Image (tube, rainbow, N blue to C red):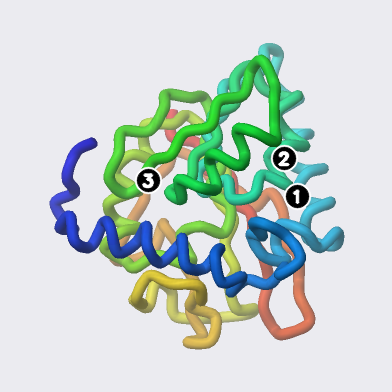
Amino acid sequence: MKKSKNQSPKKRWATKDVMHQIYENHLWGGAEFDFYSGDGSHVDAITEPYIKEVSAFLKSFESPLVVCDVGCGDFNIGNQLIGFSEKYFAVDIVPALIERNKARFKNDNLEFLCLDICEADLPKADCIFVRQVLQHLSNAEIQSFLSQLKNYPYCIVTEHIPNGDYEPNIDMVTGMGNRVKKKSGVAIMAHPFNFKPIASYELLRIVLDDESSIQTMVYQNF
């Protein structure tokens, strides 16, 4: 595992501890479950349109793609997409969560990996899924991760953002929340990230009842 230029080992372990505590204390809800990745992974109005659009995207290719799903969480979403891939790498930072997923989900083309996406070399793939992950990270961690995002031909990135105009990428401490309460959201093509794909388009936008939306973008790098 390589060390990020932006973070010390102390910071890296702090991030892992934060995510562990979120799951252990059910800070995203779902106290009746062993692990619960939040309503965004379980509410039908959010999950069903996402699965429909992403599966259609994957099926649009003549040959199945190799997929890397970072921040795979409790795998309620990914489990419904593995059948459309040649190989499916599912990555999360919480060791106990990955071990649980390994025991619960079995498929010949499925591999779970416990990695810090801001520090480790990620698996090679044709397409990477980043679903409501960056919104919980500091700008330094996002910047570190984005250095690897350019290695993937296709990137499907989902973020919780305010409706209408907003100031993108206001910094925050890594944690269970996001930037919406600050009237902000992660926009990787905006300053200070300035991610530059060769093409991009909105795949899906789910408007919520709190003046915010869950937006899924497709970025093509090459």
Crowd band around label 1 with a 10 angstrom C-alpha radius: few (<14), some (14–19), many (20+): many
Q: Nearer the viewer, residue 114 or 163?
A: 114
Residue 6 in sight in this render: no
Q: Amino acid at mark 1?
A: Tyr
Secondary structure beneath dot 3 equals loop
Q: Amino acid at mark 3?
A: Ile
Distance from Cα at disc 3 to Cα at disc 2:
21 Å
Secondary structure beneath dot 2 equals helix
Q: Nearer the viewer, residue 130 or 11?
A: 11
What residue sits right under mark 1 in the picture? Answer: 50
Q: Residue shown at 31%/33% (left/top)? A: 121
**Mark 1 in CB contact with mark 3 (< 8 angstroms):** no
Q: Which mark is residue 117?
A: 3
Q: Is residue 196 above or below residue 186?
A: above
Residue 96 located left or right of residue 147:
right
Please state the horizontal and vertical placement of residue 18, each as a whole percent of the image.
Answer: 40, 67
Q: Is residue 8 above or below residue 152?
A: below
Crowd band around label 2 with a 10 angstrom C-alpha radius: few (<14), some (14–19), many (20+): some
Q: Which mark is residue 99?
A: none
**Mark 2 in CB contact with mark 1 (< 8 angstroms):** yes
User: Residue 197 falls in which quadrant of the image?
Assistant: top left
Q: Amino acid at mark 2?
A: Val
What residue sits right under mark 2 in the picture? Answer: 54
Q: Nearer the viewer, mark 1 or mark 3?
A: 3
Q: Residue shown at 72%/68% (left/top)? A: 30
Please state the horizontal and vertical placement of residue 28, each as a whole percent of the image.
Answer: 62, 71
